[in-house]
Amino acid sequence: MFLVDRIHRYSFRPAVFATAVLASFWTACGQKPFSPHRLDSTGGDVSGFLRGLGTIARHPVNRTRHPMAFLAVTSPDGIAAVDMEAGKVVWRQPVSDRDSRLVVGRRNVYYVSKSPVALVALDVTTGRRRWKRPLGVVKGRGVYGMAADGDRVYVVIGQTGTFVPGKWSSYVEAWDGGDGSLRWRREAPGRLGAPSAAGGYVFFPYRQQYLSVLDAGSGKEVLRVRTRKEYVTFVRVLPEGVYFGGNSGAFKLNARAATGLPEKADFLRLDLSRAGKSAGLLSSGRQTGTMRIAYYWDGYEPVMFRYTAYDRNMLLWRGGRGRSFAKHRAVLEYFRYFFGFDTESGMLKWVHIEPEQDVLSSADVGTALLYATKDGQIVSVDPETGDVLWRMKTGLSLVGATFDAEGFSVTGRRVSAQNLVDVLKRIVFDPDRRLSVAKLFALTQLRNLKGTEVTQILLHILSDRKLPLSVRLKAEQVLVERVSPESVPLLLAVLHHHFDYVTGERAMAVGPVAMALGKMKVTKAVKALSEHLTDASTPLSTVRKIVTAMAKIGGRSVVDVFRQFLLDYRADAAFKRSLDVLFRVVDVLSTQGGVAERQLLAFVAEDPYSLPQLRNYIGEKLSVHASAGVDSTHKRHR
């Protein structure tokens, strides 16, 4: 009757009739999960799905309901569980075959073993092995990820090696946590990424452009949302919603996400451009320099199924209303450093440094940031202020940690976060050479802070030859970019120092100081700058910066200095490779000078001892000026 009704409705529209019949056929017969013929879900489809989605827990999912940390430990190798509410290690089991991160379900903690590749379930309360099941992973395939929801665990397995479009396949298996039986298996043509699971559904990044959702009970595909401008490499299920995305940000799953367009959807992205050039090192998404924003693990990289260095450079965030992060905050973790941002303004609010050991794993549990260090410390940090709320020493040596501690709120002795300027200075002068990128980022953030203290730090960096050249160059850039009128006396004081022929001590940071004063057009600096300009010990690289700065300041005093400078150095062979310095002087004299300066330029242009390129440049300038004068005379007489 359904098809007859459709035939009647479209009897005079053959093309529409055919489409309707095919659609009815697919609806009636159903499609296999991950079918290439499935239509993209609409906004209405997504809204209907969300109404049926079960509640996502706002508390720990393990059956004890206690906030727990499950630790991969060494010396000897094993797995341990910490009850953070009680502040103690509740169990530790020797495990030598772990080859993945730990995943927490209601009754079990899961990991994947190696040789052979198998799924292992440990009792969440005792750590004793409940079962071990071979996954049948053959050569050329590997485990991409797994997720647990209640008493089921879902494992994604796919091909490894070089990706070949059209010749790639994956599959997902659902295992029962109680008896370790295989409940179902679904094949997927193409790349299937690491899953997330909650509310009776399993979520996957699929073929880099889809969010695919399966019913956890039947394995039937119930939703598929396509993105049009962004790759999909991860899915996160949080109490505040389902989020999926890639290098550039995260879509919130709702009706607007069905557009597939970030500008039309609720798309979360950390945008630092509002804070000016502070975004120079961190751009939304892809790695810039060597500092990156990773919104979550890349589900298409099997290596991320283990605890790796990727865990130490993550953006910690939660979802808020619409396109906003929760409470307008996000925290960038970089090994031992945590940078807390106001996501509305893009400004840095606080920085926390773990003083002793590298951070191995971290998580935003809504009420706090949790992290675990290599030497077995578990720390809770206030995500609003950067204050340390709680610290526990387990005495264990760690490889990584998985937190099941949603809503954790135990507070010990609060330790207030350091002053922002002080802590950024600590990062810059940290002797740890591995973290040079963080030093550059800390310098970039100093640009937005006012006060002479920042200027003193920058000058200190410029004079410290033990620091990497990249750090000193970035400090120079920041000093020049900052507009700090209160620091003018400090900058002028730097110019009072000259090369001492007796001690061999050289003037430091004259070039960048000159550029900073030039940007602020400090006329008081002209006399001191001119003294360095005529000082024979001043390097040509610094001379260039002084001339540029004085040109920005301008005025009669600068013109007088430049007149003498041009006369003194017009024939100096040392300027053959720095002609731009003399050209800049000529530009100022021709635009800011009067008749006397034009006569001087004519003399230099005609003097056979002047550098040939300089003579030609002045000749062109004078001819342009003469033409402009003739044109203006004609206009006056017309």
Image (cartoon, grey):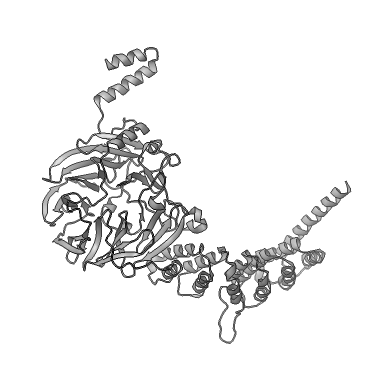
- Does 636 sit above or below residue 254? below
Q: What x and y, as percent, mark residue 555? A: 72, 66
Q: Nearer the viewer, residue 147 or 119?
A: 147
Q: Image height check: is 364 above or below 179?
A: below
Q: Residue furthest bottom?
A: 502
Q: In screen coordinates, is 489 left or right of 206?
A: right
Q: Residue at x 60, y 71 (%)?
A: 488
Where is residue 310? Give x, y as percent.
Answer: 32, 56
**Total marks in image:** 0
Q: Which quarter of the rendering shows the N terminus?
A: top left
Residue 423, quarter of picture: bottom left
Query: Is there any visible trace of residue 526 in the rendered image?
Result: yes
Q: Position of residue 27 (x, y in %)?
A: 28, 25
Look at 39% across and 39% down and name the residue there: 227
Direction from residue 142 to residue 385 in the image, left or right: right
| Residue at (19, 64) in percent of width and height | 88
Residue 491 position within the rendered picture, expressed as x and y whole percent measured from the top left: 59, 73
Residue 142 seen: no
| Quarter of image, res 348 | bottom left
Of 173 and 350, nearer the camera is 350
